[in-house]
Amino acid sequence: MRIRYLAFAGIVLFNTTFTQSHAEMAGGKNNGARDIPAIKKDCTICHVSANVKKGSALLKKSVAELCIECHNERKRPNEHAVDIVPSLPIKGLPLTDGKMTCITCHDPHQNPYGKLLRMPEQDLCVPCHRH
């Protein structure tokens, strides 16, 4: 697997060729990691190009707009709010311009916990949603 990094406006963008799961790369074998969904292997669905040269790994639209294109059912009123400034400090999770977006909890480039979650559901949700 080849990983290249491109920084743009303070955000690190990645260009990867997915041939192994994240766990396989880290530990030499699949330690319970799930495969990346096939649609996520085509970088050009979300990025201007799969080629990192000259900033071409930029997103085609905002994160929320890209996610909603495939997950239209997530626009319902009772869905988790996105593009909001969190009311609690967020530790260890990325914010986009200080706001929570879909990629705050989901990582579109790896899938070690299923549902593209960045960490186990209990560890991810309970710190903010204690009830």
Image (spheres, rainbow, N blue to C red):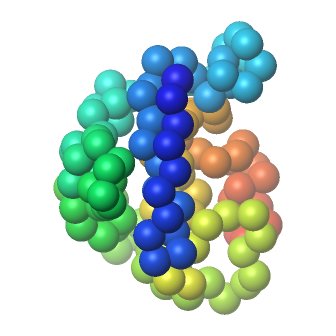
- Relative to 50, say whether 62 is above or below: below
Q: How many marks?
A: 0
- Relative to 90, say whether 104 is above or below: above
* Residue 22 shows up from this direction: yes
Kindly identify the residue that appears in the image at 73 percent across and 13 percent down.
28
Q: Position of residue 32 (x, y in %)?
A: 69, 19
The front one of 128 and 52 is 52
Kindly identify the residue that appears in the image at 77 percent across and 19 percent down.
27
Tell me: 83 left or right of 89: left
Q: Quadrant of the C terminus?
A: bottom right
> Residue most toward the top?
29
> Residue most toward the front?
54
Tell me: 2 left or right of 86: left
- Relative to 60, say whether 98 is above or below: below
Tell me: 103 left or right of 127: left
Q: Position of residue 59 (x, y in %)?
A: 30, 61
Q: Residue 16 is drawn in which quadrant? A: top left
* Residue 36 shows up from this direction: no
- Relative to 45, say whether 34 is above or below: above
The front one of 127 and 10 is 10
Kindly identify the residue that appears in the image at 28 percent across and 41 percent down.
50
The front one of 51 and 110 is 51
Q: Position of residue 86 (x, y in %)?
A: 62, 84
Q: Position of residue 100 (x, y in %)?
A: 53, 74
Tell me: 27 left or right of 86: right
